[in-house]
């Protein structure tokens, strides 16, 4: 058992901002805690503001509140501020966290709050509490059996732990023992023990029906305690007829769900297997403060419809991530009432609804129905043999998605009906080929059209054909694509490209915008200043990544090895067998196909990311990830074409691997410079996000 008390002297102070007013709390915690305290510090005092907003809409000044799983007391302080004439009881069994909690209550003069240093569960007993150093917000009551195996299943790694003995009580017994006459509001986040707390406090919940915010963590429920998430949802729904999802983004009203299936997709997202639920006995609109309801029901100024053939549910695909980013930016634009419409096969399209809900957009799927043969010959009573011959000739010269779009012509009809029913004034078509499914929309005079192109599609198609990656493509199909591209752009009021090189030629009636794709900053940040490893990630099934890996292995790695034998290169997305080069330098480590979590770990732990990409088409997702994590990187000039707002990025000359190795070696030996690079790109990202918000207002106005 580790010594928790010795950690008490290792402490720092930060500020915590209340999302609903101007109050700022002082909060202390461990500087090693990446689960709560460091996230508050990194986010400039912001901690789950969307949860605070919901609390502010429901908690009344005289309420009695329970914060079950209080940790440092971030939510305790908010509840004590909101229920200023009531009482807040904060339950926290961890001895270290309880000390921080007590100090935070005392420092902020919250005389109506009290720390209760016990765990709540099914029975009165003494149990072991497992603590994970560096993740002080993730302590849990130790389950029966092999705790190390349980942690490895839940976290994918055998993390170091400490344990301590804690008292466990039931909520019902504690309420009676302390003569608590009623309870109005409960926040519960106890790392998978929620069913046990609910069972031990069933009489309390059935008698008072307090408003409840509860974390629904699939991994903690199932891996720690063998609980079935769907069964826990059923227990909640028996007590609360109105259950809502609290979205991660602010300003989005809670979304009601009526079955476990509606929240299940949210529990399967990479590195995000939990969701906060709001449980009520009446509709949120009836219980929330009128100001909050009014704020989240502002009348829209612009009715925007977003359409794409891309699967927005995919977070492991570059196109999906870029298009999700576009939809998110539109949803964040002031005064926009956004409807997302995507087309595709059944199953693929329905999954997108979760994403649409998460950004506060309406979602209308256009599911493929029974396909029809493409219309090629429209003459009177054409012989079947003639139509078959025309279709065969047509298919050889067809553009990508063309045959599919003609086979599902019903999408165009249904989409026209949707535009009429909504009364849309603006249409955003994401990805050039998406326009093939809705040709009628490009003939409407009263509709403002915005086309987003992911890259120079003709150049990309030519590159793919010449490399033999599009065996059915022909020179004629490229020519047809060129003219089709010009037609779509000429019928668009605005065209958005990710880079200046991807912009079409100027047109008198078409506005052109360059909006580089950028992702929001991640909570987890780069911390690899002391590392001597380079990192590259990319699926080698995509030829630019294969070329990059082959250059790294055959050209860069040997040159770097001669300069620095301790420097290593980690490659995710490839094995040695997948590379045509016979070189096998000792400083290269292949990781093959890795999980999302492993990739995140490399982005945050590596010394430097490298992007030796040859083509300058579109954006490079790997560099967007670097920006969001604050990971410093060196890249080829072509790779940087999608990030024109970045200055001072070290360049990799693919024709000079020795010079590139010298540049990288100097950076690996200068941790201060890499830390400065990390800070610089973080600032550039924030500036770009603010600039893009203004540009989107221009585009949609």
Image (cartoon, helix red, strand yellow):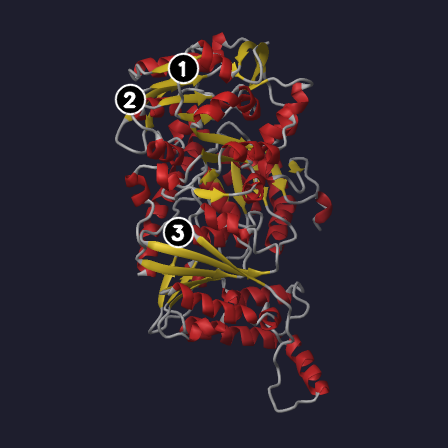
The reply, left or right, for residue 689 in relation to residue 4 is left
Circle 3 crowding by C-alpha within 10 Å: few under 14, some 14–19, many from 20: many
Report which quarter residue 346 is drawn in: bottom right
Task: Tell me where residue 604 appears, x and y as whole percent.
Answer: 51, 34
* Residue 250 as seen in the image, left or right of residue 201: left
Left or right: residue 627 compared with residue 158: left
Mark 3 and mark 1 lie on one chain; the one further toward the N terminus is 1
Residue 104 seen in the current view: yes
Gap between marks 3 and 1 measured at Cα: 44 Å
Q: What residue would you read off at disc 1? A: 180
Quarter of the figure with the C terminus:
bottom left
The image quarter containing residue 42 is: top left
Q: Element type at marker 2?
A: loop
Q: CA distance from mark 3 to mark 2?
A: 35 Å
Q: Nearer the viewer, residue 178 or 492?
A: 178
**Labels 1 and 2: the sequence-earlier one:** 2
Placement of 365 over or under 577, stated as above or below: below
Q: Going from the N terminus, do you reach mark 3 or mark 2 first?
A: 2
- Discs 3/1, front: 1
Residue 632 appears in the picture as rendered: no
Q: CA distance from mark 1 to mark 2?
A: 17 Å
**Image coords of residue 593 (percent x, y):** 66, 42
Q: Which residue is mark 2?
A: 84
Mark carried by residue 331: 3
- Residue 364 in the image: x percent, y percent? 49, 58
Q: Residues within 10 Å of mark 2 (few under 14, many from 20)?
A: many
Percent position of residue 522, x then y: 46, 38
Which-is-in-front pick, marks 1 and 2? 1
Q: Between 72 and 607, which is closer to the camera in this rendering?
A: 72
Quadrant where the image shows the N terminus: top right
**Identity of the residue furthest to the bottom in this view:** 380
Crowd rating for badge 1 (residues with CA inside 10 Å; few <14, some 14–19, many 20+): few
């Amino acid at each position: 058992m580790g010594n928790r008390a010795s950690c008490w002297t290792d402490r720092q102070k930060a500020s915590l901002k209340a999302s609903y007013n101007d109050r700022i709390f002082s909060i202390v915690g461990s500087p090693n805690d990446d689960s709560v305290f460091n996230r508050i510090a990194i986010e400039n005092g912001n901690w789950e503001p969307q949860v605070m907003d919901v609390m502010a809409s429901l908690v009344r000044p005289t309420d009695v509140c329970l914060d079950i799983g209080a940790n440092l007391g971030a939510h305790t302080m908010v509840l004590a501020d909101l229920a200023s004439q009531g009482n807040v009881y904060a339950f926290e069994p961890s001895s270290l966290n309880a000390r921080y909690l007590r100090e935070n209550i005392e420092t902020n003069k919250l005389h109506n709050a009290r720390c209760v240093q016990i765990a709540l569960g099914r029975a009165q007993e003494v149990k072991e509490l497992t603590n994970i150093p560096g993740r002080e917000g993730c302590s849990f009551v130790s389950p029966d059996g092999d705790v190390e195996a349980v942690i490895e299943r839940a976290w994918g790694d055998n993390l170091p732990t400490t344990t301590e003995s804690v008292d466990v009580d039931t909520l019902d017994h504690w309420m009676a023992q302390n003569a608590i006459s009623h309870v109005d509001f409960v926040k519960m986040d106890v790392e998978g023990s929620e069913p046990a707390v609910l069972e031990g406090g069933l009489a309390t919940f059935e008698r008072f029906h307090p408003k409840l915010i509860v974390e629904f963590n699939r991994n903690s429920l199932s891996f720690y305690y063998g609980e079935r998430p769907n069964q826990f949802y059923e227990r909640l729904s028996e007590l609360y007829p109105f259950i809502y999802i609290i979205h991660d983004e602010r300003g989005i009203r809670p979304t009601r769900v009526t079955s476990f299936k509606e929240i299940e997709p949210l529990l399967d997202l990479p590195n995000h297997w939990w969701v906060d639920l709001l449980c009520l006995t009446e509709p949120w609109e009836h219980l929330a403060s009128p100001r909050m309801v009014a704020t989240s029901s502002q009348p829209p100024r612009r009715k925007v419809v977003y359409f794409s053939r891309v699967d927005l549910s995919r977070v492991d695909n570059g196109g999906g991530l870029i298009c999700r980013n576009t939809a998110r930016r539109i949803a964040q634009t002031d005064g926009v009432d956004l409807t997302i419409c995507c087309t595709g096969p059944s199953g693929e399209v329905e999954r997108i609804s979760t994403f649409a809900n998460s950004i506060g957009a309406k979602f209308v799927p256009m599911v493929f129905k029974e396909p029809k043969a493409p219309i090629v010959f429209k003459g009177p009573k054409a012989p079947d043999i003639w139509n078959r011959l025309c279709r065969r000739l047509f298919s050889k010269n067809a553009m990508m998605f063309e045959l599919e779009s003609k086979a599902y012509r019903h999408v165009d009809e249904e989409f026209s009906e949707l535009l009429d029913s909504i009364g849309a004034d603006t249409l955003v078509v994401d990805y050039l080929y998406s326009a093939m499914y809705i040709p009628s929309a490009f003939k409407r005079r009263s509709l403002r059209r915005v086309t987003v192109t992911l890259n120079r599609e003709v150049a990309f198609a030519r590159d793919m054909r010449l490399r033999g990656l599009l065996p059915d493509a022909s020179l004629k199909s490229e020519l047809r694509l060129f003219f089709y591209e010009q037609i779509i752009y000429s019928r668009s009021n605005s065209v958005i490209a990710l880079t200046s090189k991807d912009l079409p030629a100027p047109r008198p009636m078409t506005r052109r915008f360059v909006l580089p794709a950028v992702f929001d900053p991640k909570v987890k940040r780069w911390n690899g200043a002391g590392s001597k490893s380079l990192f590259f990630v990319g699926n080698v099934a995509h030829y630019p990544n294969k070329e990059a890996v082959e250059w790294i292995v055959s050209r860069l790695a040997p040159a770097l090895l001669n300069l620095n034998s301790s420097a290593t290169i980690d490659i995710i997305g490839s094995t040695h067998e997948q590379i045509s080069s016979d070189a096998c330098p000792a400083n290269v480590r292949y990781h093959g196909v890795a999980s999302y979590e492993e990739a995140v770990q490399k982005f945050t732990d590596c010394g430097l990311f490298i992007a030796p990409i040859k083509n300058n088409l579109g954006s490079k997702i790997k560099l967007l990830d670097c920006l969001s994590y604050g990971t410093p990187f060196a890249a080829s000039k072509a790779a940087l074409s999608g990030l024109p707002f970045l200055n001072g990025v070290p360049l990799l000359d693919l024709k000079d691997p020795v010079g590139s190795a010298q540049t990288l070696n100097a950076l690996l030996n200068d941790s201060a410079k890499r830390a400065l690079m990390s800070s610089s790109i973080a600032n550039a990202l924030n500036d770009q996000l603010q600039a893009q918000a203004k540009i989107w207002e221009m585009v949609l106005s």
